[in-house]
Amino acid sequence: MTDRKTQLAANLAKVEERITAACVAAGRKREEVTLIVVTKTYPASDVRILSELGVRHVAENRDQDAAPKAAACTDLPLKWHFVGQLQTNKVRSVVGYADVVQSVDRSKLVTALSKEAVRAGREVGCLIQVALDAAESGRGERGGVAPYGIEELADLIAEAPGLRLDGLMTVAPLTGEYAGREQAAFERLMDLSTDLRRAHPAATMVSAGMSADLEQAVAAGATHVRVGTAVLGVRPRLG
């Protein structure tokens, strides 16, 4: 093994232990939780190593980094998730490689994604990003729609050609009533997921939790956790 592969294998094993322990503590089966490795700022060579180590889900948050990386890894059995705030002028590119867009938070984006998915002949999974720190504007600091906006957006996605409503996503908020209360935030997301599934039973995916708070997400019932630093190491500074 190369040094990098050895390092990534060791890090993955530690994350796997954490997820397994969190599942045991929550009385859940390990297979109920899917690990998504967030590969942003890291090269395609790391993605290739992760694939060799059995990772099947990777995530990116910037199209300018993700598009060439995905193009370099088309031979790998990977599912690509886009998790960053997405501008409509990047939608065509993102639809070219993303299997799931986890950051859908406005109707204009739904329209753009639908148009490009149809044009590309693809079905793109969509998660509604929920902002639990949403101000009066109905938007969160890091994107997302306020809880009261979920129903309308869900109906739009469900009816849009080329799109599939998969569920909800959130990032633990840094401000507002849930700041520093990650598990409470994730439990709130689960309640919102229960509400969503009454109208859209197939929208079962709940993406929550990252390197620092994956245990709280698993305890709350998340189906997917997005882990970057704990697998790949501390990120190099951009710029």
Image (cartoon, helix red, strand yellow):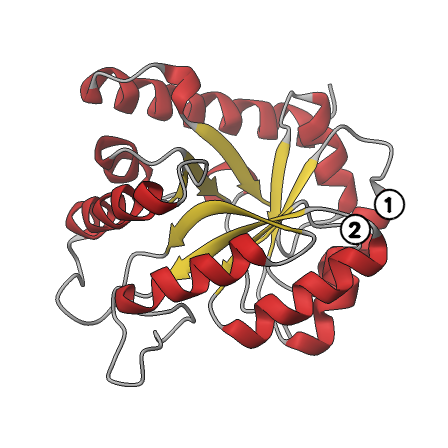
Q: Is residue 171 left or right of residue 4?
A: left
Residue 95 position, x and y percent, is 74, 57
Q: Tag 1, which secondary structure?
A: helix
Residue 159 position, x and y percent, is 56, 56
Asked if residue 235 shows in the view, the reply is no
Packing grade of label 2 (10 A; few <14, some 14-19, many >=20) is many
Q: Is residue 57 left or right of residue 173?
A: right
Q: Is residue 12 above or below residue 59?
A: above
Q: Is residue 124 above or below residue 204?
A: below
Asked if residue 113 shows in the view, the reply is yes
Q: Nearer the viewer, residue 177 or 200?
A: 200
Where residue 66 sits, quadrant-wise, is: bottom right
Q: Nearer the viewer, residue 10 or 99?
A: 99
Q: Which mark is residue 142?
A: none
Q: What whole-number distance in Å separates the C-alpha atoms at marks 1 and 2?
A: 5 Å
Q: Nearer the viewer, residue 56 or 232?
A: 56
C-beta proximity under 8 Å, tags 1 and 2 = yes
Residue at 86% across, 45% down: 72
Amino acid beneath label 2: Lys
Packing grade of label 1 (10 A; few <14, some 14-19, many >=20) is some
Q: Quadrant of the C terminus?
A: bottom right
Q: Which mark is residue 69?
A: 2
Give the residue furthest to the bottom.
137
Q: Which residue is mark 1?
A: 72
Residue 33 position, x and y percent, is 41, 26
